[in-house]
Amino acid sequence: MNENPPATPPPVVYWTVWGSLFLSALLYLGILELGLLGDSEEPAPEEAADRTLAVALGLAGLFCGVVSVGVGYVVKNFRDAEGRKKTPAWSFTAFIIAVALAETPAVFGLVLGLVGHGSGDYLPLFVVAVLALLLNRPGVYLPRG
C-alpha cells in the first residue's frame, strides 16, 4: 500500500477553480440584474413567490457561507504534532469543499431571482457568496512550511 501523501496540485489549479467560481457568482448576479432571462421588473407583492422559499434559501445560504469560511479557518490554523503551523495534506480537498460551499449562496440567489423574487431577497445571498469566496482565496490553502 502506498503511504505517500497525495501530490498537491500547482497553485494555478487553485486559482483557476477559485476564479471560475468567483466569476460565475458575478455572472449569475449580472444575469438577474440585467434581466437577461426575462422580465426585469420587480414583482408586485401579491405576485411575489412564497416568502418561505426566500427565508429557507437565505438561511441555508448563510449557513453554507459560514461553514465555508470555517473550513478555511481550520486549514489556516492547522498545526503539526510539534505545534508548528503547517498546511495539511488534505488542503486541496478542503479547498474544493470550501469554495463549493461558498458558491452555494450565489446559486440560491440565482434560484430566487429566477422564480420571481426581488433583489432584496437575492442580493444578500450574493454578498455572502462573494465574501465567502474572498475569504477562501487560494492563498489560505496553498502549501506552506
Image: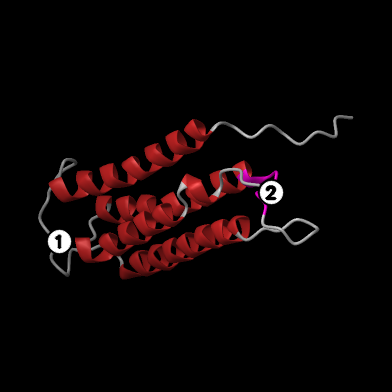
Query: Outermost residue toward the right?
Result: 1
Answer yes or no: is residue 118 visible. Answer: no
- Find residue 28 and report its horizontal and vertical position in percent: 28, 45
In the rendered image, which quarter is residue 54 located in? bottom left
Q: Is residue 1 above or below residue 71?
A: above
The CA distance from mark 1 to mark 2 is 48 Å
Write the start and end of the magenta stretch as one range.
86-91
**Drawn side of residue 44 relative to residue 76, left or right:** left
Q: Earlier in the sequence, mark 1 or mark 2?
A: 1
Q: Is residue 87 magenta?
A: yes
- Find residue 98 and report its horizontal and vertical position in percent: 53, 51
Q: Which residue does the image show at 43% across and 34% down from the upper left? A: 16
Dominant secondary-structure state across the stretch colored magenta: loop
The label on residue 43 is 1
| Amino acid type of the residue tagged 2 in the rendering | Pro
116 and 118: which is toward the camera? 118
**Drawn side of residue 134 relative to residue 91, left or right:** left
Q: Is residue 8 above or below residue 54?
A: above
| Amino acid type of the residue tagged 1 in the rendering | Pro
Secondary element at tag 2: loop
Q: Is residue 113 magenta?
A: no
Q: Which residue does the image show at 61% across and 55% down from the upper left? A: 75
Answer yes or no: is residue 97 visible. Answer: yes
Q: Are marks 1 and 2 in contact (CB under 8 Å)?
A: no
The label on residue 88 is 2
Secondary element at tag 1: loop
- Find residue 134 and report its horizontal and vertical position in percent: 39, 53
